[in-house]
Amino acid sequence: MPDELTGAAAPAIRLRPDFRPAAVLSRTDKSLLIAGDCEDGPVVAKLLTTREALWVEKFDVEIEAYRCFVDTPPPVRVPALIAADRQHHVLLVEHVRGRPPVQGRDRFPPHALDPTHVSAMLTAMTDLGRWRPPAGAFTRTLDYLGRLDRDRCQGLVTQHEFQALTDLFHRADTGLVPGHGDPLPTNFVIGPDGGATVIDWEHAGHYLPGHDLAVLWIVLAATPEARTRIEELVAAEPPSVRAAFTVNRAVLLVRQLRNHRALAPSSWRDERVAAIDRDWQDVREPLRAG
């Protein structure tokens, strides 16, 4: 196993010869995470194991995010950048102390989360939305109008809903703000002091205000207090931000419906589709009435 681990970690060792791999944290068909140590301290090496253009692009986005954090620290905790190599798709960052607020990799935690952990996650995402990175950073943007038009063409939203959401998009004329893009509970590490460190920045970019809160509103369906808190945060914002939050929820819910309906039939899939559809019906009802 030591020789096998060293072989797997070879790209990271070439980048940082002082990297000493200790254990594989996770392995997917797209990436490999290896925990180890450098002179700087505990480190996680992330290695891209696919050359699919989509995942190469996301890996580059994550590297650029960490490089941006070095020059312009965000108002949220992030792992320190140790080293990165875009050409060979290697990223080494600080291995932060703590644990995720949820066990496993389920995008939709089936049980309510600790309220203190929820509060830490919401604070982090709210603070991030107020950050202003330098020009040229966080260049990825979500094409809202393109998404809405695709959803209309696929029959996932009606013409009336499309027009209502397009009108809301234009009313949300506050400009795009930096966002994590995919703030699942598994992308947070809760430290010993209760604070949240945000990891996995491959979806970092600019979004309408409230995008990251909308993601958490959707995935924390089993934590009603979280939804209440998010809705209170949004209600305290100007009308343009409230409009943006509605557009974000609509775009995200329709995407979730599309993705889950494409899965092979199973009891889990059917339950998820039903739950997401209930949330979508709640969001689309005022659109129909408008």
Image (tube, grey):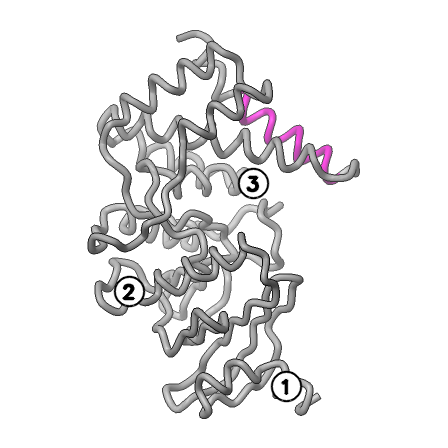
Magenta stretch bounds: 268-281
Residue type highlighted by circle 2 = Phe
In the shown orientation, is residue 140 left or right of residue 148? left
Q: The residue tagged with tag 3: helix, strand or loop?
A: loop
Location of residue 66 (image quadrant): bottom left
- Is disc 2 in contact with disc 1, using a CB cutoff of under 8 Å? no
Task: Find numbered disc 1 in the image and state the secondary structure of the residue it sits on.
Answer: helix
Q: Position of residue 205 (x, y in %)?
A: 36, 48
Label ID, residue 7:
1
User: Which residue, given by chain and number where applicable, does mark 3 sit on?
Assistant: 222
- Label 1 vs label 3: CA separation? 42 Å
- Which type of secondary structure does the marked residue at label 2 adopt? helix
**Residue type pointed to by label 1:** Gly
Q: Nearer the viewer, residue 32 or 246?
A: 32
Residue at left offset 37%, top offset 19%: 166
Q: Check disc 2: other Cα within 10 Å, few if <14, some if 14-19, many if 20+.
A: some
> Residue drawn 37% across and 78% down?
82
